[in-house]
Image (spheres, grey):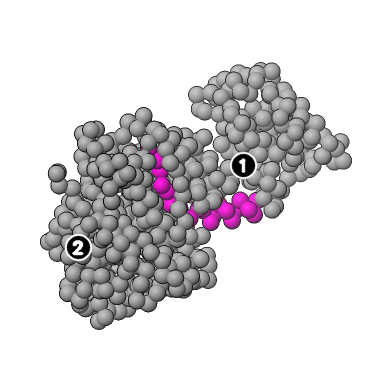
Amino acid sequence: MPTQNSQPQRRVVVTGLGFITSVGNTREQVLTSLRELRTGIEYYPELERSRVLVRLCGTVKEFSFPELHSDEWTYPAAYTIPREHLRSMSPNAVYGFCAMKQAIAEAPLPPELVSHPRTGAMCASGGSSWLSYDYMAMMLEKGPQRCNPMAMVASIAGTLNMNFVSCFGIKGHSLGFSSACASSAHALGEAFDRIRLNRQDIVFVAGAEDCDLFTILPFVGTRALTTGTDPSISPCAFDVKRDGFVVTGGAAVLVLEELEHARRRGVPIQAEIIGWGEASDGYSVMAPEPEGDGLKRAMEAAIGEAGISPADVDYINAHGTSTPVGDAAEIRAIKRVFGNGKGPYISSTKSITGHGLSLAGAMEAGFCCLALQEGFTPVSANVTELDPEFGSVAIVTDAIDYSPRVAMTNSSGFGGTNVSAILRRWEEG
Amino acid sequence: MPTELTEEQITKVNHDFRRCREGTAEAIIRLRRTGDTALIPEILRGIVWRYVRPDAREQVEKASLETPLSTLGMDSLMMLEVVLDVQDALDVTVEDTELRRVKTFNDISELLMQRFTEIHKAALP
């Protein structure tokens, strides 16, 4: 796709990553967990407060949010969040702040490039149901004038982008995305486009979610969660016994940068993003189209934009939430795109992290960067009896010695929205 | 108010104001018990102390009643945080129009004393 003035196509690379996830709060911890298949999922006692059978959560460690007032919140000692910023944050913005600090340090970006008209932030969080609920109760009881004036910016779905602009002095584009579990995948795609179209040089892509009872319970209502109690068994994407997902929260940040900009700075490049695609099912507000029609078209669009053929894709980090219908629709879509041969290796990292909802797309794109850079293929945990329908595709149920060169990451959300993005191992040239 | 407080109310005041300057929670409890509005300036100082940056706390200790609050590094949102706590401490509601006139400890102390007396006068000795 040539630009109007026939300049060469601008290329988009990843120069920084940050993770606050159930499987680790640093790059090293996340890498170890992915390589050694260490789960971040555990028994979550808070669930006993509600009459539900669900017991598991992909908990975020080293943080606590014991009460509404942010002065009581704790986070790892490596970070300092000034009070004037903390008071307007949600838990997901706190996670996001810490992931952002890691990504900035990795890139490494000096303050004048973080806060620059050509540097933007594309963010995704579902807001904070906990803060919304408690603050609204306070407003009704005592009146809005006696409630924290920051209640709204801390609670609503734009909390992540609004806080980032303020904390980090973002001067370029800033936007929030709300497409359910595809939100931060959309953020990634939009960031990619804005750099390609020469509207920005650097864009932070951030996904974040609270990780508490208020995040989990609405999904119990949808009957989408596993009632399994043992994280070495559940969730089990692609297994015949799969019965739903486990919720997680946290944050992931990617620094997307125009290639020549990164080269001029002389910084290490972690991976290249070569294309993305999106499509909707036009089918149901909640259930995926059974044949994965939207996801199929999203994958095809991504492959087309990347200018590669399906055979070039080595690994797919699947949406793979471990719901009976979701996994089936995705594998059917993959079969239709990649043919009936073995095709690319496929795994769901959600079987050790849990499903990060708005965070999932950014987190899993980050995992793909690690896999490409470090030369390994993540395993799909907890598969003891592969669904016979998936027998013909290459689901990675045990560790393999394979270094992928091209990785695809899929995300699907309520409303039948689907995003697929393709990343390539960085090889100078 | 003024009234004897229940154990539960005392625990709540001690909890809610534990991050304020030492003695603030005790002063709030005494105010509620006695209705002695002379305690209000020190309660206010104790709450302001909580919200300013740590390096400005010494200034808060030394500030006279005429010190403009802006010189203590307080922005409008910190001011609101202080007002929220003060309203809880005194169980009064301060109107926004009244707040806009507030510049110093003295301004807000007088306003609070007035509001406190109006609201609780029926119960005052």
The numbered mark 2 sits on a residue in which chain? A
Q: Nearer the viewer, residue A7 or A412?
A: A7
Left or right for A192, reference A395: right
Q: Amino acid at mark 2?
A: Ser
Q: Secondary structure at mark 2?
A: loop
Residue A309, label in figure: 2
Q: Residue at horizontal 14%, vertical 64%?
A: A400
For residue A241, which quarter of the picture?
A: bottom left
Q: Nearer the viewer, residue A350 or A408?
A: A408
Q: Residue at horizontal 29%, vertical 68%?
A: A232
Residue A310 x/y as whole percent: 21, 65
Q: Are marks 2 and 1 on the same chain?
A: yes
The numbered mark 1 sits on a residue in which chain? A
User: Which residue is disc 1 drawn over?
Assistant: A149
Q: Magenta span covers which residues?
A: A119-138
Q: Residue furthest front?
A: A5
Residue A178 x/y as whole percent: 47, 56
Residue A22 x/y as whole percent: 35, 56
